[in-house]
Amino acid sequence: LNAPPSRFDNPVIKYDTKDPTKEVGDIIYTADPAVMVLDDTVYLYTTHDEQYADGSDYRMYDYRLWTSKDMVSWENRGAVLKYADFDWARGDEKTGNAYAHHMIHRKDASDKSRYYFYVTVEGGQADGKFGFAIGVAVSDSPDGPFDDPRGMPMILLEDTAQYKDHSWRNIDPAVFIDDDGNAYLYWGNKQLWWVELEPDLIHLKGESYTLNALGKMQNRDTSKVSIHAVDTLPNFEEAPYVSKHNDLYYLTYAAGFPESIAYATSSSVTGPWEYQGIIMDPLPGTTTIHPAIFDFQGNTYLAYHSAQLPGGGSYRRSVCVDRVYFNEDGTIKPIVRTSG
Ligand code: FUB
């Protein structure tokens, strides 16, 4: 195996060569990277921007998987999960949006790998109002098919009703499993929240419910669930991402609007988080940036999105990767973007 690169031909995802209805070379716009590294492979899960050139909002209906063993060539594994795969999603296949997501892997008690795909999907009615909700789908393969084991969202509008009241406040899930096996879900827009998960990774700690005849949840009760707000992150906008490097926890996030990439550190996964600064300034042509930090073959990398493909923009973004370099004290050096 060749060593992974320190310069990248950004954006790393450019073309859809798997869709039989398209010629090789057709552009596919991707955003919101979530990266899972298993053995010698990088699994890059992205959202998918399908907006027209002159569109003025998101059009996002499915989640895409791209894999690489060298981070130079990327295999297009197709749409592995769709908005419409969630029964509780609002409307039909092309009515609502599938926003940013997260993927983690864990072996179950019988040593079988399970893959947990946390999503932001428009739906999940509470008190007569629709908003974005966070759900989960599970598979025994990183390519799916994924099944929604709950039959309802994990986080609904009503769960954060005491906080900032906008319908997209519950977006951008990120899950981190700590060394002791405890798992935590982070999410939010304008306000960062976190909650501990049950060991099954699909229920909130303390959540109670009954099951209907199909084995899906009903009568959900969250009165014993503790949802925590984090207020020490300047200009927190969205896209939290938790990672651990050399015994220090890092919480990377999109700050301000247009967004920069900022981060905070802590000696504990539950904080308190100490703000450390900006590592990437806003990028031309896109209001959002969505960081994801990951380790691969001994190095640390940052995935994010730009608008630099032809026809690109805030609703036609493209996933990029660059190297992360640390200072001796664990702080991160400003990211130097490379584009081939
Ligand atoms: O892609 C839709 C939304 O834009 C994501 O959920 C945010 O993180 C921002 O990238």
Image (tube, rainbow, N blue to C red):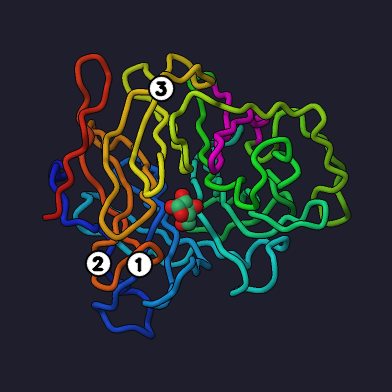
Residue range highlighted in magenta:
181-200
Tag 2: amino acid: Leu
Dot 2 or dot 3: first in sequence order is 3
To which residue does mark 1 refer? 29
The spot of residue 301 in percent (x, y) is 26, 39
Judged by depth in the image, the label closer to the viewer, 2 or 3, is: 2
Dot 1: element: strand
Dot 3: element: strand
Dot 1: few (<14), some (14–19), or many (≥20) neighbours within 10 Å?
many
- Which residue is at a point 64% across and 49% down the rendered structure image? 166
From this view, report whether residue 187 is shown above or below residue 57: above
Of residues 18 and 153, the one nearer the viewer is: 153
Dot 2 or dot 1: first in sequence order is 1
Q: Count the marks: how many?
A: 3
Q: Are marks 2 and 3 in contact (CB under 8 Å)?
A: no
Residue 309's tag is 2
Dot 2: element: loop
Query: Does 53 appear in magenta?
Result: no
Dot 3 or dot 1: first in sequence order is 1
The spot of residue 329 in percent (x, y) is 24, 14
